[in-house]
Image: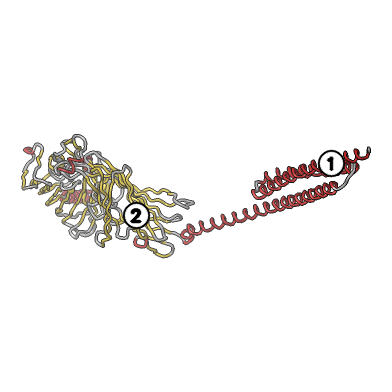
Amino acid sequence: MDAWKRRLCVLFFVFSLFQIAYSAKEVHNIERLDRTIDLNKNFVTEKVVIKLGKGKWDTLELIFSLQQYECLAQVQVEDSSNHILPVKEQQETEVLFRKFVVVLGSTPEDTLKVTSLYMNCLKPKPRVIPKDGDQYLYYESYVRFYCPYEVKEQKTTINFPHSQFHFIEQEKIPQLSFNGNKAILGPYKKVPSMDSMTFGVRFRHNTPLLTGSQVANTLKVSHWGWLQVLESYDLENKGAESKGGFSRLDFQSNSHYYKPVVEDVVARLPTEARDVSYKDYVGNITSSHLRGPDRSKGRILQLKFRYPLIGGWKNAFFIGYRVPSKKYLKSLGSNQYQLRVNIPPSIRSIVIEKYVLRVALPEGAKNIAWDYSVPFAFDNVNNETMFDLLDIQGRPLLVFEKRNMVPTGMNWGSLVITYELKIWNLLEKLLLPVVFILILLAGLSLASRLSLYLRDDTEASNSVCLNNLYSLHCALSDTYKEAIHNFSIMKGSVITEQFSTSYNSIHARLKELELQLELLNKKIASLGNVKLITRANQLTEIDKTKHEILQRWYSTTRSKLSNLSSLEKEIGQY
């Protein structure tokens, strides 16, 4: 037994040695690496062609220093067939750098193309320039490609927009050569891993560094025909500032003044865009031109600034339009729908520090899922609720956030969102206003009928009372007039006394009627019926006129009777 144990231990030891030796042979290295850095735009494009060494490669590690990571906008890896490979960022990384892992898959690939986009890494130097001066930018990077593998041979080519460039301490940079507006570093042999030697270069570049400090794109989805889009922009020219104030005369008369400026921006809208509008918060956009639609380019919206954006100047505005939803929204059956959204904004000539894409789905949407074809298209995704017109529970709002975005850098693909929406939720927005209007009209009709019924009954009773009093007043007035006429043709003192008694009785009754009429006028005035008030005032005026006439008639008749009585007495004495 002891002999067998010793033999097994020896075999295990030999097997461990073979495994260690095999692992040592499997140390990965890179046969050749060609790097190209393009500095012709307002962002930096770094393309690296990697030829892998011998051995089995399941994954490829890419590392970026913290300075590179802060400016990194996008990483894309393609194989020799131009297929995009998945790239995953390692969450638990070192303090000094960030690591990305490229999954190569089962198919062996010996050549890979890595494209990295950087923004905000071009700094104006000097920061302030004269009005007629050129803008110079400063760029810093690694002399050799920063990677965790040993590279047998590598070379770097830097493309400049102009032949005027200068390397800082270029005598310390090995194997540096120039060819027109290009600089070539290398080739270098047996480059160790994590080589951190850097270089700095200053070059002339009059392209404005137009940056969107925050760009938000809000889409409101509707199943009734249209998709509303609202894009807001906060732009800033981060290029060199101009010494002194802005002069319109110098800008228009001399093309050598204010070179790195932004005079206008161009938005590429979909071909189906309708009802295009814009709003400038500070009033710096004076004119706009909308062209198209063109099948290849869509509709072109050009916004021209009143004051061009020189270095350090800002402007904020938004663009709104709507497109038919049938092109972006389709039904999958069983109350399932799929929405396809373009990721980048309409203005592509900028670099964006913070991009927010908001997608407001119809109210009642559930079982929401999303997917995007481009890796690392967004950094954060949040679920919120948005309230719009006629919303009760609110719309599901998907908020996608992206730090450091270069819209023109690569093909962004599209964002695909699937969700479930029942037929009742589609008809709810249509039925609720109809039901509300019907209920409102029914309520108004009922209230109107109740109010008219009460008002008509009161007016009728008041009108009857008023007519009765008017008829009675007319009868009394006729009786009074007849009595005065009858008494006026009588003679003698007895007749005079009877006339006075009859008049006093009629006058008392007339006063009583006038008092009742006055109380009725006050009641009618409190009701506020203009028609009845006018009629009551007319009767009051007629009553006053008749009363005055009767007073004069009474005085005249009484005087005549008194004169006749005195004459009879005088005649009787003789």
Looking at the rendered structure, the secondary structure element under dot 2 is strand
Dot 2 amino acid type: Tyr
Does residue 178 appear left or right of residue 60 in this picture?
left
Residue at (85% x, 40% y) in the render: 563
Is the residue 180 above or below the residue 169 in the image? below
Looking at the rendered structure, the kind of residue marked 1 is Asn
506 lies left or right of 31:
right
- Colouring scheme, one of rainbow, by chain, secondary structure, one colour: secondary structure
Residue 10 visible at all? no
- The tally of labels here is 2
Circle 2 sits on which residue?
A: 321
Q: Nearer the viewer, residue 39 or 211?
A: 211
Q: Nearer the viewer, mark 1 or mark 2?
A: 1
Query: Can you say which quadrant of the picture contains the C terminus?
Result: top right
Instruction: Return the x and y of residue 261 as percentages of the image width and height.
Output: 20, 43
Mark 1 vs mark 2, CA separation in Å: 90 Å
Q: Residue 23 at what x, y percent from top left?
A: 18, 50
Q: Which residue is mark 1?
A: 504
Which label's residue is closer to the chain start, 1 or 2?
2
